[in-house]
Amino acid sequence: MTTKYLWQWSGIDNAGALQQGAHWSENRNAAMQTLYHRQIHPLTLKRRPVRRSLWRAEHGCTLLRQLATLLQAGLTLPESLLLLAQQHPARQWQALLHHLAQALEQGETFSTALRQWPEVFPPLWAAMVHTGELTGKLDECCFKLASQQQTQRALALKVKKALRYPLIILSLTAAIVVAMVYLVLPEFSAIYQTFNTPLPGLTRGVIASATLMQQGALPLSALTLLVVCTMTLLRRQMKWLHYRQRLLLRCPVVGKLVRGQRLSQIFTVLSLTQRSGITFLQGLENVRDTLTCPYWRDVLQQAHQDITLGAAISTALAKSGNFTPLCIQLIHTGEISGALDTMLENLARHHSEQTQHQADELASVLEPLLLVVTGLIIGVLVVAMYLPIFHLGDAMGGTG
C-alpha cells in the first residue's frame, strides 16, 4: 500500500473565494494535482503530522454508529461521509472522510476504500461492510459491528483493569517503602544513635534491612534497568510472545481472565460474521486479523488449515487444546443441528459474562487484600521507627 501523508492547504476557487482544508496524498505533487482538479488555485500547502492516537478503535466505532444512523435516515453514503467530515473536530479524520467520499464518487465500493486504510479500519470492518453492500443492509451491518467493537473494548478494559490494579497498588507501596528507607529511617537512626540505650529487635531489624538496601541501591538499580531493557527487547521476539502467552494461560487466576477474554473476542466475531452471511473460514480469517497476540493468531491459523483439509470445526478447535470442553461440545452440536451461528452467539455471551464476573470477583478480593498487605508493610515501618521513643524517657532519666 502506498503511504499517504496529510496536507493542509489554502487556496482560491474559480469564484474568487478563499478555501482551506486538508487532504491525503502520496506526495506534494499529487496534492497539488488534486487541488487543480477541484479547480482550486493553491496558496499554501503544508504537510501536517498525524496523531496515531486518533486512529484508535473507539473513534472509529463512534463514526461507524453515526454513519449507520445517517444511512437509516435516508442519506446516501457519500452524503453521510461528507456530513460526518463537517462535524468532526479532528482535521485528519475530516480529510479521511472526504477522501472516502471522493473514492465512492469515482466508482469504488466502500469496502474497497476501507481496505486502503488498514491502520485505521481492521479487516473485519471491510468484510462486514462488503457483506452489507451485497445484502443491501449496510446500516444494519454497521450497527452490529459498532456494538460488537464497543462490547469487546469494554470487556478488554475491565480485564486490563483487574490485572493492572494489583501492580499499581504494589508499585505505590514499593515507592512509599523506598522513600521511608532512604529519607526517613536514616534520620531516626541518627537520632537513636545519640542515646545510650539498646534498640528494640524490630527496630534493629528494620534499620539493618534499610542499610542493606542502601548499600545495594546501585546493583539493584542496574538489575532493574537490565530487566526493563530485556523485556522491551523480548516484546519484539515471537518466541517470547508465544511463551509469555502460554505462561499466562497456565496461571490459576490470570489464565482464566486472559483465556475468557480471548474466547469471548473470537466467538463474538465469529457469531457476527456467521449471522451476516460470511463463511466460517472467512470469519476465522477476520478473527485472526483482529487479534494482536501471535500465539492466538497461530492457533486460529492452524485451525483454519485443518478445516480446509476437511476436518470438522469442533475437531480442529479441540486439536489446539485452547478451547474449553463447553466450546467443543456446543460447536459440535451446532454443526450437527445446522445452528452454528446460534451456538457461537451463546458461547460469546457465556465467555463475556463469565469473564466480567471473574474480573469483578478478582477486584473485590484483591482490593481488601492489598490494603491489608500495604497497611502491614507501612505499619511495621512506622512502629519500628517510633517504638524506641517509649524507651527514651528511661534513657534520659538514667543519664540525669
Image (cartoon, rainbow, N blue to C red):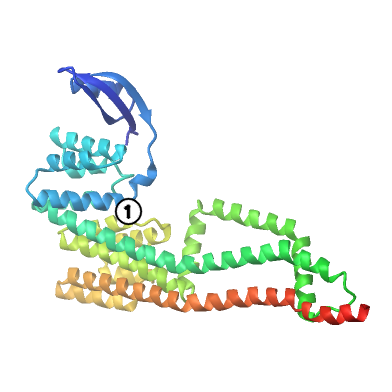
In the displayed image of the protein, which residue is found farthest to the front? 400
- Against 281, residue 118 (above or below) is above
Q: Horizontally, is 15 left or right of 197 in the view?
A: left
Residue 345, by quadrant, is bottom left
Please give the name of the residue rendered at 23% of the width and 23% of the height, measured from the top-left corner: 35
Q: What amino acid type is highlighted by mark number 1? A: Asp
Q: Position of residue 85 (x, y in %)?
A: 22, 39
- Against 335, residue 73 (above or below) is above
The secondary structure type at the circle numbered 1 is helix
Q: Horizontally, is 212 left or right of 146 in the view?
A: right
Q: Residues within 10 Å of mark 1 (few under 14, many from 20)?
A: some
Residue 170, by quadrant, is bottom right
- Against 257, residue 140 (above or below) is above
Q: Horizontally, is 306 left or right of 271 in the view?
A: right
Asked if residue 212 shows in the view, the reply is no
Please give the name of the residue rendered at 58% of the width and 76% of the height, measured from the top-left corner: 373
Q: Position of residue 333 (x, y in %)?
A: 21, 77
**Position of the N terminus by quadrant:** top left
Q: Position of residue 59 (x, y in %)?
A: 30, 50
Please give the name of the residue rendered at 35% of the width and 76% of the height, measured from the top-left corner: 357
Count of numbered labels shown in the rendering: 1
In the displayed image of the protein, which residue is found farthest to the left? 74
102 or 164, nearer to the observer: 164
Residue picked out by circle 1:
289
49 or 292, nearer to the observer: 49
Residue 342, by quadrant, is bottom left
172 or 305, nearer to the observer: 172
- Against 73, residue 46 (above or below) is above
